[in-house]
Image (cartoon, rainbow, N blue to C red):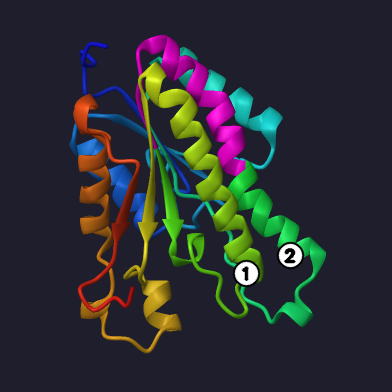
Amino acid sequence: MSEPKTKTGLAIVAGAGEGLGRHLMTRFQAGGYTTVGLVRTMPDRATADAGLIRLDLADAAATAVVIGDLVSRHGAPAVVIHNTAELVISPFAGLSAAEFESCWRNTALSAMNLAKAVLPDMVEAGGGAFLVSGATASIRGGARFAAFAAAKFALRGLTQSLAREYQSQGVHVAHVLLDGIIDTPRSRDLHDMDPALMMRPTEIAEAYWGLAHQPRSTWTHEMDLRPLTGNF
């Protein structure tokens, strides 16, 4: 299979809120992509030219409509990043079925709906990259993280299945395990931790950029990222 003719085009970042998502958008914009961010809740300070679209990816019909409109205007996406999740931290005895399901819907089901909407057009266009953000909980379930770990385990399994089905069709499907605390204003408020020991979102975004542009003879399926002090 020949190499793709272009490394730019449309890049979609699902889960483009403040933090890593916005840095991913900035990096791919800087690289020449037309970049669109999908958010479940529009940020208060969002501007008209921020490139954000409000979309609940757990809604399959709405996802198909929004992606279809983007493809009709910009062509098939060259890069799609699923960075959407819902963090639920609760003792298992106090965890409700509604919370468990909501976490799964906004983490795993959202990825399925996004993949359903973009992969056929990406294959027809000759390929691209479909990248998925994982977490420590993707491989290790911790106390009080039953809902989040179950959803992230499901997301990792989905990503593996998609890679085995679509890699031969030219789509690079990869899972990025983010094993650490990402440095954002919110995480600084939540964690009594030296920011120097956190993961810098600009540097995470650079890793995603490199992953999206690997040559087809050396595709990475799963990449682990963690700070130098990370325990693993």
Residue 115 image offset from top left, x and y in percent: 53, 31
Foreground residue among 34 and 209: 209
202 or 232, which lies in front?
232
Which residue in the rendered view is the most extreme toward the bottom? 192
Residue under label 2? 99
Residue span colored magenta:
110-130
- How far across and how far down the image is residue 218, in percent? 21, 33
Identify which amino acid the numbered label 1 is placed on. Answer: Val
Q: Quadrant of residue 211?
A: top left
Q: Position of residue 57 (x, y in %)?
A: 61, 40
- Element under disc 1: loop
Residue 191, image x, y percentages: 41, 84
Q: Considering only vertical position in the picture, is 39 above or below 96?
A: above
Element under label 2?
Answer: helix
Q: Residue at x 61, y 34 (%)?
A: 113
* Image quarter in which the N terminus is found: top left
Report the side of 22 relative to 82 (left or right).
left
- Residue at numbered disc 1: 88
Residue at point 21%, 24% (across, down): 7
Pick whichever of labels 2 and 1 is earlier in the sequence.
1
